[in-house]
Amino acid sequence: MPLPRTHAEPNRWAVLALLGVAQLMVVLDSTIVNIALPSAQRDLGFSTESRQWVVTAYALAFGSLLLVGGKLGDLFGRKWTFVGGLIGFSAASFVGGLAPSFEVLVIARALQGVFGALLAPSALSLLTVTFAGSPERAKAFGIFAAVATAGASVGLLLGGLLTDVLTWRWCLYVNLLIAIPAAFFALRLIVNETHPQRPRIDWTGVVLACAGLFAIVFGFSEAETDSWGSPATIVSLVAGVALMVAFVVSQTRGTSPLLPLHIVWDRARGGAYMSIAIAGASVFAVFLFLTYFMQQNLGYSPLKTGVAFLPLSATIFVMAPTIQTKVLPRFGAKPIIMTGMALGAFAMLVFFARLTPSSTYLGHVLPGLLIIGLGMPCIFAPSFATATLGVDRYEAGVASAMVNTCQQVGGAVGTAVLSTIFAGAATRYAADHARTPGAAAAAQVHGYTTAFYVATAMFAVGFVLALLILPRRIQPQAQPVGEPAAEAA
């Protein structure tokens, strides 16, 4: 029995605005709390060694549950996973804002990650089905990619503003002002669409995927804070790889797999996931190092640091829709993604060659930020659209979850690897040079530039892989999502 077409919402642009706000909340929450951490540490009295768990708890829950969250949306309806994610995220944020102790704050952050894993894939998959077959699809994905890409730097600005003007707790309370109105409008705007056959959940795949992703994210987090040779790091990474191999094997044998492998094996989608992972691995670390540089070397306050990232955010917001609507139809995704990788490598070289202890923001930081602002939309805008290209309507959730999984795991891997390289380079520099008044600052900057040099190589690898993997011509805006099986019949 054919189902009625439910993806033609009464106002697509209202739905896009709603989804963009929800996505912004999820993305900026990965950085807004970073700015507030020193104030939270003073208030709650936890140690510097424990501080990383405020960030890690969110990353572990979010990264390990994304595939499950996307699949639940496909099976039971993305409207309810979206609304449930908004309500749960706001409740967890409220608990975190009220947290009387470090333990409560960490639990609240983990709950944010759980509900974020419901919310993020639901938002992208709703966008996919809402604009399926629409001539406005390209513009919609460009705007959504701009929000998703620039959200991290917006989080730095908002976190600095709220911490300086109010308290660190408002970095969590602010989510209530976003999520509750968004849930109200979602109930009115979004039409629910459930799977007509409701297949069984692949519980084996759920356990293997969650455990494997958890172990990988945890292992890289441990490497960043402890060392690559620590038993916890080695055991976690080995176990994570083994579990993910078992997960892939299990997906080839089940009748209703958690992640149908044809989604990933497709060259266009697989290349898009790869591009998102590599860009995420490099860019999240750049935000971290530049934040440290501006606060520790330039003496910026949290708010001023956030303002310093505004040119990056503005460039992304302008370029992403333009690339998606004007450039992509003419040249296709492959050369644009390769251009983004080249611009990313060039930006890293600018930081590598120009940053010194006496550098200034206008002369040495801003040029690289503007180049990143040009390059990242070239990667993320076409990749976001290509990652859900041609998938069945009832697989859009898990395909969207793969986007967020690649971004999250890529960010964890990149931050751990580049942080380790930074620490090693800074330590060696300090050991090899005399202890003068400016030696500590010089060692820090040497660590940053070494990490930027390695990030250059990461973008270069991304350029080569995009050249080899992506098909010659991809036009996401011209290919709608596949129709339901009943309708096709």
Image (spheres, helix red, strand yellow):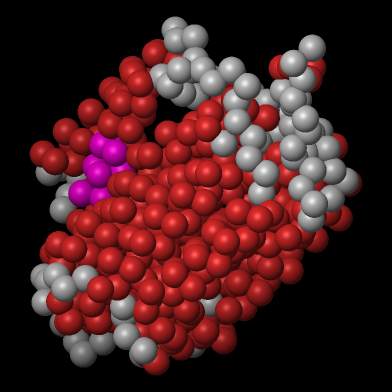
The N terminus - image quarter: top right
Position of 209 relative to 456 (above/below): above
Query: Could you tell me residue 331's position as x and y percent?
Result: 84, 44
**Is 175 colored magenta in this rendering?**
no
**232 or 213, which lies in front?**
213
Query: Could you tell me residue 171's position as x and y percent?
Result: 38, 75
Would you say the magenta stretch is mainly helix, strand or loop?
A: helix
Residue 122, quarter of picture:
top right
**442 or 158, which lies in front?**
158
Q: Is residue 346 left or right of residue 242?
A: right
Residue visible at 58% across and 79% down? 310
Query: Could you tell me residue 199's position as x and y percent?
Result: 51, 17
Total labels drawn: 0
The C terminus - image quarter: top right
Residue 319, quarter of picture:
bottom right
**421 or 119, which lies in front?**
119
**Is 218 colored magenta in this rendering?**
yes
Whether residue 277 is visible: no
Whether residue 111 is visible: yes
Residue visible at 73% across and 44% down? 130
Position of 438 relative to 73 (above/below): below
Residue visible at 57% across and 36% down? 77
Q: Is residue 210 left or right of residue 316?
A: left
Q: Is residue 82 left or right of residue 341?
A: left
Position of 276 relative to 185 (above/below): above
Q: Which segment is the magenta one? A: 214-222
Query: Could you tell me residue 15's position as x and y percent?
Result: 70, 55
